[in-house]
Amino acid sequence: MKKSLVLSAVISGLLFTTMNATAAEPLELQKVMKELGKNMQIVTDGISREDWLLVEHTSHLIGGHPQPPVAEKLRIMTFMGANMAKFKEFDGQTHEFAHEMALSAQAKDGQKVISAFQKLQTSCLACHQAFRPAFVEHFYGKSDK
């Protein structure tokens, strides 16, 4: 009995320490977002130079961005609660508008590329405004500002 109590206390302590140690570690989602930001800059450069092949290729990277690991998704879903549907909707828009941009770049239609890029940027901004401050506060314990 005494051994099981000691063992429980040790395990609880290790879990608490592990959870606190990883709380401030960057989420994979943060890495995905940084990569998306870099790709958005590449698209901007490609549009300005009318490098439609670069825009098309990078659009596929944006639309097919990696997903966080399952354990992290569960943490995010738990945190998001009822807002998860809206969060997923924004992610769906990312895929949709990136695909639209890739098709427009493949057709070398600069006006449609810019239109799709504008929709993508607007969707990104709306998601960031809706969720980023709370994410940063919850997962990193600091203000986004």
Image: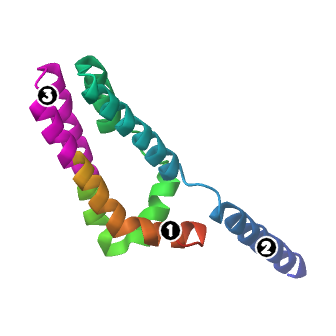
Q: Earlier in the sequence, mark 3 or mark 2?
A: 2
Residues rendered magenta in the picture: 91-119
In the rendered structure, which amino acid carries the disc numbered 2?
Answer: Gly
Q: Earlier in the sequence, mark 2 or mark 1?
A: 2
Q: Position of residue 123 (x, y in %)?
A: 24, 54
Residue 137 drawn above or below residue 69: below
Q: Is residue 139 left or right of residue 13?
A: left
Query: Given this view, does label 3 or label 2 mark the residue nearer the observer?
Result: 3
Label 2 SS: helix
Q: Which mark is residue 53?
A: none
**Local crowd at mark 3 within 10 Å, few (<14), some, or many (≥20)?**
some
Q: Position of residue 76 (x, y in %)?
A: 45, 63
Q: Is residue 15 magenta?
A: no
Q: Are marks 1 and 3 in contact (CB under 8 Å)?
A: no
Quadrant of the rendered structure where residue 140 is? bottom right
Q: Mark 3 = which residue?
A: 110
Q: Mark 1 = which residue?
A: 144
Residue 140 drawn above or below residue 121: below
In the rendered structure, which amino acid carries the disc numbered 3?
Answer: Gly
**Distance from Cα at disc 3 to Cα at disc 2:** 58 Å
Q: Which mark is residue 13?
A: 2
Q: Is residue 141 left or right of residue 55?
A: right
Quadrant of the rendered structure where residue 65 is? top left
